[in-house]
Amino acid sequence: MDIELNKESDDYYCDYKGKKADPTKHGGIRAAILTCVVEVMSSMVFLCNSINLVDYFLKYMHYSVSESSTMVTNFMGSSYILTIVGGFICDSYLTRFTTFILSGAIELMGFILLAYQAQHSHLRPPENTRPSPVAAAILHIGLYCVAIGVAGVKAALQTHGADQVDDKKQKNLISSFFNWYFFSICSGALLASTIMVWIEENCGWSLSFMICAIVFTFAICIFVAGFPIYRNKRPAGSPLTRMIKVFVAAAKNTRASPSVNVNHNATTQPHAREQSHDKLKFLNKALIDAAIDVTMVDETKSFLSLLPIFATTIMMNCCMAQLLTFSVQQGNIMNRKIHNFIIPTQSLSVFALAIILSFIPIFEQFRHIYRHKDTMQSKTFQPLSRVGFGLVLGIMSMAVAAIVEAKRKQELIMNDITISVFWLVLQYILVSVADTLVMSGMLEFFYSEAHESMRSMCAALSWCSSAMGFFISSVLVAITNSASGKFGKEWLGGKDLNHDRLDLFYALICILNIVNFMFYVYFAKKY
C-alpha cells in the first residue's frame, strides 16, 4: 500500500509536456536554486519601492504624512493579501509556472506605467498641490498592477521552488529550501536598501522605476529558461469548492451520531495524508454523504488547523509596517550626516540585513547538526519554536522604538539637539531578525502541514499574515487618532512627528503584541 501511495503521489508532478516527471531529469536542487536566483531579483524590484515609497508620496506626489503612510501600508497589504488568490489559482486551475508568467507580465506593466508617470512632470502635481484625478488614477493603476503581479509571483514562486525538492525520503530539504529562499529575499532587500535607495535619492524615481522594469524582465527570462528541468504540480481543482461541500455535508448530518473514522477508507484515497488530524471531529460526519471522501475531509481539517497560528502572527507584522512608514519619517528628521555624506534612512536596514544574511547559513549549519538528535536544541529549530522566538523579538523592537522616540523628542525639546539616526539601528535589527524567524518558520510550517492539493494557498497564508498586519496598522492609526483626538490632540495627526506622540503609539503596539504572544503560545501548544 505504501508503494502505491508514493507512486500516486509522484504522478502529481509532470514536465513541461504534461508527461510524468522523471526524477533524474526534472526538479532537484538545481531547479530550486534557479527559483532562488529569480527571487533575489523579484525581491529587489519590489522592496526597493516598498521601503522608500513613502518618500515618493510625500515629496513627489505631495500627500500628507498620514496619507503617505496609509497608502504604503495599503499597497503592501494588497500585495500580500492577494497571494491567497494567487495560491488558489495555482492549486486549482493553472500550474505554478504559468501563474508566475502571467503575474509577472502584470507586475511589469505596473512598473512601466509608474516609470512613465515619474518621467513626465505634467503627470505629477505642482509643489504643495494635491495630485489631479488623472495623476492619482495613473499612480494607483500602476501601483496596484504591481501589487496584483507581486501577489501572483510570490504565491507561485515559493511553492514552485519547494516542489522541486519535495521528497518524502529527505524532508530536511524542504526546511533548507525555505531558509535559503528567505536568504534570497534578504539578498534582494540588501540590494534594494543600498543601490536602489541611493538611485532613488540621487538620480530620481524615473530611473529607479525603469531599472525595476528592466531587472524584472531579466528575472522572467531566467525563470522561463529553466522550464525544461522543472517539475510542475498538476492543478487539483478548486479546494474551496471541496471544503464548502464538506461543511454543507457535515451540517446536514449534525444530528447523526455514528462512529465515523477519518481513516476508514484510506486505502481507496491515494492522496489522503498518512495521519489525519485528530481534531475537528464534527467534520467526520460529512463522510456519511456518499459524495464526500476522506481526502476532502482531510484537506478541510488541514486548512482549518492552520488558521489559529496564522491569526496569531498578524500583530507581529504591524511592527514591520512601522519600519516602512513611521521609522522612515523619524530618520528623515534626525541627524543623518557623517562628515559630508547624508545617510538615507532606508539604508539603516543594511545593518539588520547583514546580520540576517550571516545568521541564516549559521542557522542552517546548526540545524543539520541537531536534526537527528532528540534534544531541546533540536526542538528550537522547529518552525513553531522559531515563530515564537520571532514574536518575542517583535515585542522587544516596539519597546525599544518607543524609548528611542521619547529620547529623540526629549533631546529636541529640552536641549535643541537632533540625535543621530543610528539610534534607530537597534529597532531595525530586532524587527528584521524577528521577521526572518517568523516568515521562514511560517513558510515551512504552512507548506509542510498543508494538504498536497492546497499547498500554494496554505503557503500564501504567510504573506496574508503580513498583509493583515499592514491593514491593521492602518486601522490602528485611524482608531488611535480618533480616540486621542477626543481627549485633546491626535497622536499621529500632524505633518511633523515633532508634534506627534509616536512614542505612545509604539508602546500601544508593544502591549498588543504581548497579548497576542500569549494567544500564540496557547494555540502552538494545542497544535
Image (cartoon, grey):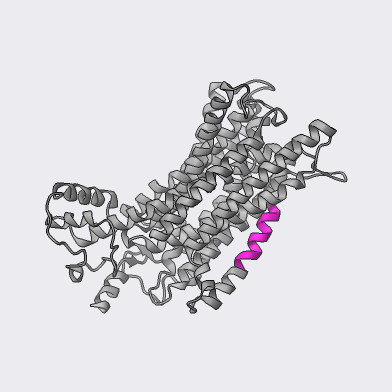
Q: Position of residue 521 (x, y in %)?
A: 46, 56
Residue beneath the point at 67% across and 29% down? 500
Quadrant of the snapshot with the C terminus: bottom left
Which residue ends up furthest to the right in the rendered image?
A: 339
Magenta-drawn segment: 350-361
Q: Report the side of 265 relative to 66 (left or right).
A: left
177 or 386: which is nearer to us?
Answer: 386
Residue beneath the point at 72% across and 50% down? 425
Residue beneath the point at 53% across and 76% down? 370
484 or 314: which is nearer to us?
Answer: 484
Look at the magenta stretch and give its main secondary structure. helix
Q: Position of residue 96 (x, y in %)?
A: 40, 57
In this view, 450 is above or below 248: below
Q: Is residue 358 magenta?
A: yes
Q: Report the side of 506 relative to 96 (left or right).
A: right
In this view, 290 is above or below 128: below
78 or 287: which is nearer to us?
Answer: 287
479 or 465: which is nearer to us?
Answer: 479
Q: Is residue 406 magenta?
A: no
Quadrant of the snapshot with the N terminus: bottom left
Q: Position of residue 445 (x, y in %)?
A: 44, 61
Residue beneath the point at 56% across and 21% down? 486
Q: Quadrant of residue 398?
A: top right
Q: Quadrant of residue 401?
A: top right
Q: Position of residue 240 (x, y in %)?
A: 28, 49
